[in-house]
Image (cartoon, grey):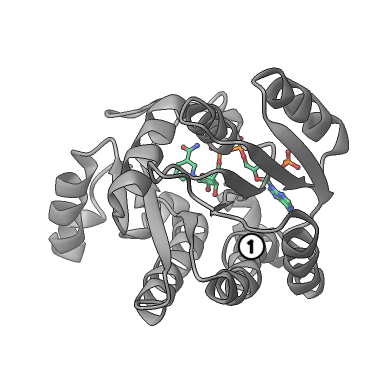
């Protein structure tokens, strides 16, 4: 349950080793967060993250979770809520950028990107929404991307998976109005994390900490969509409306 000041006290992270998610948990720890469940597939990295968060005074549990094992997701959500009680915030933070050149050669790589980023998010968010509706409160934070606002030719497999989850998350949020449960759609641009390591930065690149601060501020005011950094909202409003012959000439 949120405390009297409205700060979340319990968080479930799906993609428990995500740099953005861990920065968000650290930021929430400064605002009286008490417990976190880290769900992920990399046991060693999860143990390191769990130890670090315990050092901040949080009660930390770890759960096995593979975004590609979609048949297991409903049971995982049931188990987490049954064992840990109320979950105030669920961070849906798993995702893969993938290799588009490889995806164009191999359907398997394209399927991995889409199944992780889109299908895996659908099969986790629906049971999350059900359990949060039963408890009568909670926010599902979905890590979308500006890449989903308009698919770029250089990255359209990833971009389409983010467009899918973004549309799904907005619709889910609309369907939950009046239940006490909300959905926050987060649309970062280029963030310096493991996912983008070694890639050339673009204008308005940002940090996991900046995304974390935006998530914490958006949760506090009950926002439904946030761009990070904020000016990307206006940049992509323009890009979305460019005529296609012009858009496809932009080198990005
Ligand atoms: N970094 C950016 O520029 C950027 C921009 C916009 C949106 N985003 C989105 O933000 C989210 C977090 O990304 P990040 O930047 O924090 O990158 P990250 O540190 O690489 O985190 C990605 C997370 O996804 C997990 N994951 C991938 N496939 C999985 C699977 N099959 N099962 C379970 N977990 C899986 C990874 O776990 P492992 O440790 O097991 O690999 C890792 O915890 C992603 O959805 C990403 O698309 C990132």
Residue 200: in sight, yes or no?
no
State left or right for residue 202 relative to residue 61: left
Residue 6: in sight, yes or no?
yes
- Residue 139 drawn above or below residue 39: below
Among the 4 quarters of the image, the one containing residue 242: bottom left
Q: Residue at x 47, y 59 (%)?
A: 139
Q: Residue at x 42, y 77 (%)?
A: 179
Q: Quadrant of ligand 1?
A: top right
Q: Which residue is mark 1?
A: 110
Q: Nearer the viewer, residue 241 or 224?
A: 224
Q: Nearer the viewer, residue 40 or 182?
A: 182
Q: Residues within 10 Å of mark 1 (few under 14, many from 20)?
A: many
- Residue 204 drawn above or below residue 160: above
State left or right for residue 211 relative to residue 136: left
Image spot of residue 82 (x, y percent): 78, 64
Circle 1 SS class:
helix
Q: Quadrant of the C terminus?
A: top left
Q: Residue at x 51, y 34 (%)?
A: 24
Image spot of residue 122 (x, y percent): 59, 72
Q: Nearer the viewer, residue 125 or 106?
A: 125
Among the 4 quarters of the image, the one containing residue 132: bottom right
Image spot of residue 141 (x, y percent): 47, 54
State left or right for residue 231 relative to residue 78: left
């Amino acid at each position: 349950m949120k405390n009297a000041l409205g700060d979340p006290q319990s968080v479930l992270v799906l993609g428990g080793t995500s740099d953005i998610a861990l920065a968000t948990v650290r930021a929430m720890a400064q605002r009286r967060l008490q417990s976190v469940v880290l769900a992920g597939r990399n046991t060693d990295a999860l143990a390191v993250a769990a130890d670090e968060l315990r050092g901040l005074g949080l009660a930390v549990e770890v759960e096995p979770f593979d975004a590609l094992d979609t048949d297991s997701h409903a049971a995982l959500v049931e188990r987490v809520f049954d064992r840990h009680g109320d979950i105030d915030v669920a961070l849906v933070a798993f995702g893969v950028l993938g290799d588009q050149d490889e995806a164009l050669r191999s359907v398997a790589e394209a399927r991995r990107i889409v199944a992780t980023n889109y299908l895996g998010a659908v099969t986790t968010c629906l049971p999350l929404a059900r359990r949060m509706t039963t408890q009568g409160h909670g926010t599902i934070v979905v890590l979308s991307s500006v890449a989903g606002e308009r698919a770029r030719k250089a990255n359209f497999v990833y971009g389409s998976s983010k467009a899918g989850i973004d549309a799904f998350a907005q619709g889910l949020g609309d369907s939950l109005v009046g239940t006490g449960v909300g959905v926050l759609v987060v649309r970062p641009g280029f963030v310096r994390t493991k996912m983008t390591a070694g890639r050339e930065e673009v204008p308005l690149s940002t940090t996991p900490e900046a995304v974390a601060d935006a998530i914490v501020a958006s949760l506090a005011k009950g926002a439904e969509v946030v761009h990070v950094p904020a000016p990307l909202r206006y940049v992509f409003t323009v890009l979305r409306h460019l005529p296609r012959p012009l858009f496809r000439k932009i080198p990005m």
